[in-house]
Amino acid sequence: MVYVVTLETPPDVPDDARTAQRDAIKALAEQGTLLLAGPCTDGKGGIAILRAGSIEEARAIYEKTPFAAGGWVKWTMREWDARTGALAGHLSA
């Protein structure tokens, strides 16, 4: 299944936390767990799309990221049934 994480990031997140988050996200992408991620252009947060066997598994994965573990972001996660669009078949594979 696919899970969407939306996060709100305060402007005062230290650079070392941002670097650690980028490294963690890169590692999740290399593992195939993270499908897409990036900041929103308004500078107030971002979105990540994860692949996991259950929402509990996806939450456990995201809770270990530096932003979540450090309490730097307010985040929510929802299961997403991505069934329409150019990437839909790739997301659910």
Image: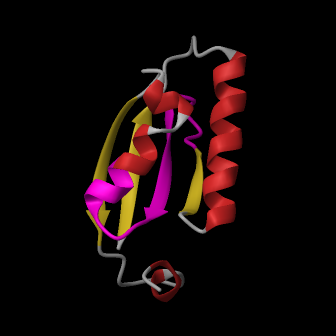
Direction top: furthest residue = 12
Which residue is at a point 65% across and 14% down the rendered structure image?
14
Q: Is residue 18 above or below residue 83?
A: above
Which residue is at a point 48% across and 48% down the rendered structure image?
47
The image's colour scheme reads secondary structure
Image quadrant assignment for residue 52? bottom left
- Is 51 inside the magenta-drawn segment? yes
Residue 68 x %, y %? 44, 31
Q: Is 20 displayed left or right of 85 in the figure?
A: right
Image quadrant assignment for residue 8? top left
Q: Is residue 90 above or below residue 35?
A: below
Residue 54 x %, y %? 29, 66
Q: Is 81 displayed left or right of 47 in the figure?
A: left
Q: Which residues are magenta?
A: 39-59
Residue 27 x %, y %? 67, 52
Which residue is at a point 68% across and 31% down the rendered structure image?
20
Q: Is 46 displayed left or right of 14 in the figure?
A: left
- Is 55 inside the magenta-drawn segment? yes
Q: Is residue 82 above or below residue 45?
A: below
Q: Is 21 displayed left or right of 92 in the figure?
A: right
Q: How many numbered marks are there?
A: 0
Near-viewer residue (82 or 50): 50
Which residue is at a point 72% across and 30% down the rendered structure image?
19
Residue 5 x %, y %? 40, 49
**Looking at the figure, which quarter contains the N terminus?**
bottom left
